[in-house]
Amino acid sequence: MELDVKKFIEEKIREIKETIRDKKAISALSGGVDSSTCTVLAHRAVGDNLKVIFIDDGLMRKNEPEDVKEIFSAMAISVEIIDAQEEFFKALEGKSDPEEKRKAFRDTFYTIFGKEVSRSKARFLVQGTIAADIIETKGGVKTQHNILEQIGIDPEKGYGFKAIEPLKEIFKHQVREVAKDLGLPEKLYNRMPFPGPGLATRVVGEVNPARIELVRKATCIVEEEIEALRPFQAFAVLLSDKGTGIEEGARKFGEIIIIRSVESKDAMTAEPTKIPWEVLTKISKRMTTEIPSVTRVAYEITPKPPATIEYV
Ligand code: XMP
């Protein structure tokens, strides 16, 4: 379906204005294209009646909070960073089941968010839910952290605010068109999707600061080496299994990193990227030299379905 971008933007700004009126709203920015786009839409609608926060959950890519703040300040939108790393790691401690981890993330996110809402006296939460999130959560494919009403949780009763989701009828590629038209920088509207629960979806088994730091470094290597291929999404995954390697003549049992890179239009289905051999071997070499605890690197080629894009 073709989207009339200008008409969409006009309509959404009007709707948001009519809903929020002179009350306060809050937006939790993640730096991804979805939350950035709905934040700019809401800012255009109500200006400084929108408070923009960035919850630093400790599960972001390298330099994420600082980069996001800078990009938004260039658009005259100020962003407050809330340091909640400890809370998230505590909630995730000892959990290895993927759905348990997702639920722990979601509950922590909304508890912290709830506190910020009451502090700011906001009555509305602006969030970047897109069509695929709703379809997949309803279909039971995953517990998407930002879907509440769709699974029968009323945020107004539970948390005291109403959700505004201006992007819920459109898909990722359409969000990018909207973002471009709104004047967001290309770095942002062409950005690879990054899941709400962050790097926690890329650590199989226990999530702790050390394992997150490892996958953060590995992700950075994959992103740098694969950027020129412009895949839909590419990243590294840390497995809970280990594999034997050799260091200075001795055997050592080290970490296994999976490279995941997919092509997709809307994230509902995906195909593995045909990564040239030289790129794969360069990534492998960098992983094992720059992250010495890594002994094995593998490229995973399962399409979605039957696999999902993320690992958790
Ligand atoms: P899966 O792994 O389900 O992911 O095939 C499909 C797309 O959604 C992203 N994803 C999420 N995005 N919150 C988000 O905002 C989430 O909980 C979440 N889980 C997955 C994923 O990165 C991919 O683009």
Image (cartoon, grey):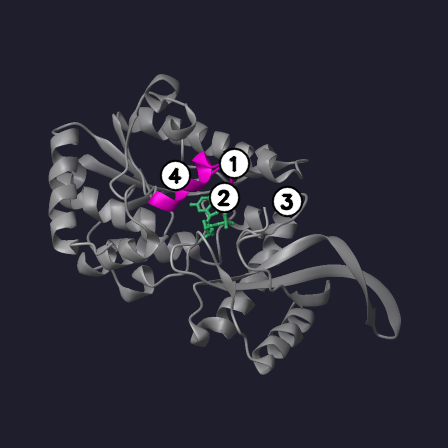
State whether label 2 is within 8 Å of ligand 1: yes
Q: Residue at x 53, y 74 (%)?
A: 274
Please identify the quarter of the rendering in which residue 277 is found.
bottom right
Left or right of 71? Residue 236 is right
Between circles 1 and 3, the one closer to the viewer is 1
The reply to whether residue 45 is visible in this rendering is: yes
How far apart are the two marked residues, 4 and 1, measured between alpha carbons?
Answer: 18 Å
Say which residue label 3 marks. 208
What amino acid does circle 1 point to? Phe
Numbered badge on residue 197: 2
Numbered badge on residue 134: 4
Numbered badge on residue 105: 1
State whether label 1 is within 8 Å of ligand 1: yes
Q: Earlier in the sequence, mark 2 or mark 3?
A: 2
Is 133 part of what is drawn in magenta? yes
Q: Residue at x 38, y 30 (%)?
A: 150
Numbered badge on residue 294: none
